[in-house]
Amino acid sequence: MIYLYDFIIALTCTIGFAVLFNLPRTAILNAGFAGGFSWVIYNLFHNITHSSVLSTFVASLAIAILAETFAVKFKFPATIFIVPAIVPLVPGHALYYTMLSIIQNNYSAAVRYGSETVLVSIAIAGALTVVLSVNSFRKLKRSPN
């Protein structure tokens, strides 16, 4: 039941950012689905592994795969779906606590939160790069030239 609640909240958040980024109307609900689904994947893996980096990597993989699937089906670029769907995974809270720890002169906590922020960001970028590279390679092998 908690995963359904998480899905609805993340879907609503992603749809809000999709509207804010002025996505085409036919793409808004699909981007919301990608955001909601990825947040459920994140929470599921976080409950199993207790690692925010690994959970973010797997959820980002899910976003990239869904975005590539939606891009082929609806004839939009994959970034249309990726940008609003990745927003729930952005490590804003860790960045906030990094800045707060620096202001409070608690440098050990700042290093801990800052390293988590950097690692989560690298996990997002790495997962998107893996899926987009595999898809580019697949398209290259399909082309007749």
Image: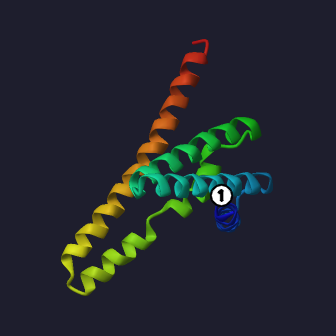
User: Which residue lies at the image location 73% right of the left edge and 39% below the top edge?
Assistant: 75
- Viewer-closest of 83 and 93: 93
User: Which residue lies at the image location 64% right of the left edge and 50% below the top edge?
Assistant: 81
Horizontal side of residue 107 vs 27, given as left or right: left
Residue 124: image location, x then y, percent = 45, 51
- Viewer-closest of 66 and 22: 66
Instruction: Give the image quarter of residue 31.
Output: bottom right
Q: Can residue 15 be seen in this view?
A: no
Residue 136: image location, x then y, percent = 53, 29
In this rendering, is residue 135 above or below 88?
above
Farthest residue, direction bottom? 104
Horizontal side of residue 92 vs 20, given as left or right: left
Q: Name the residue under label 1.
A: 36
In this rendering, is residue 4 above or below 141?
below
User: Which residue lies at the image location 37% right of the left edge and 71% below the top edge?
Assistant: 95
User: The disc labelled 1 sits on which kind of residue?
Assistant: Gly
Instruction: Give the image quarter of residue 17.
Output: bottom right
Q: How was this image coloured?
A: rainbow
Q: Can residue 85 be seen in this view?
A: yes
User: Which residue lies at the image location 70% right of the left edge and 35% below the top edge?
Assistant: 72
Q: What element carries label 1?
A: helix
Residue 11: image location, x then y, percent = 69, 62
- Viewer-closest of 81 and 22: 81
Residue 106: image location, x then y, percent = 21, 81
